Image: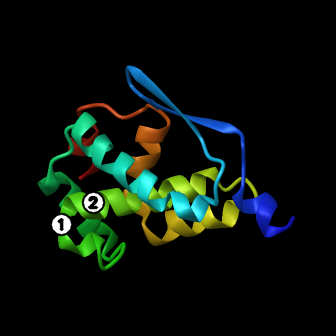
Amino acid sequence: MGLRKRFFTEEPFNLSLITKVYTFYIKQNVGNNQTLFHEIGHNIQTKFKIKDSDWKKVKDSDGNSMSSYGDATEGEDLAEAFAKFAQAKLNKDSLKELEDFKKEYPNRYEVLNKIWNNQYNSGFMSWLF
């Protein structure tokens, strides 16, 4: 498949956040939607009341940096992590991208995947560590 097929889609994707379903139609290069996914990451932190101190544990347990921008605060790291996670999750042509994310950031992956699959609950962070 060519790059156009790989990175362009007119198919909707739904992101269910407990009581609300957000439907997005991505019609541009997925790489250009990094900002959209990043901002959704900030909303996820607010919606699920993920404390910076809890996310710091997740980040520190992975032992690596998501990005230089994400290094500024835990909230920025979460947003950067969600942006990369969502992009990998939506890349239907490459499971490798998602597997690479899971391998490099296993704890971030675990939290974000629970949220993505609507399996996150208020006690989740407490049993993670």
Q: Identity of the amino acid at label 2?
A: Val
Q: What element carries label 1?
A: loop
Q: In which quarter of the image is residue 105?
A: bottom left
Q: Which of 2 and 102 is in front in this view?
A: 2
Is residue 39 at all visible to an observer of this figure?
yes
- Of the numbered discs 2 and 1, the one sitting upstream in the chain is 2
**Badge 1: how crowded within 10 Å, few (<14), some, or many (20+)?**
few
The structure residue drawn at horizontal position 30% and vertical position 42%, both measured from the top left corner, is 43
Q: Which residue is drawn at the image coordinates 22% and 57% (left, top)? A: 75
Q: Residue 73 carries which label?
A: 1
Marks 2 and 1, how far apart at CA: 13 Å
Name the residue: 24% across, 69% down.
Answer: 60
Question: Looking at the picture, how far across and down is residue 103, in whole percent?
Answer: 51, 68
- Residue furthest out toward the right: 1
Horizontal and vertical percent for residue 41?
Answer: 35, 50
**Relative image position of residue 22 (x, y in whole percent):** 48, 30
The N terminus lies in which quarter of the figure? Answer: bottom right
Residue corresponding to mark 2? 58
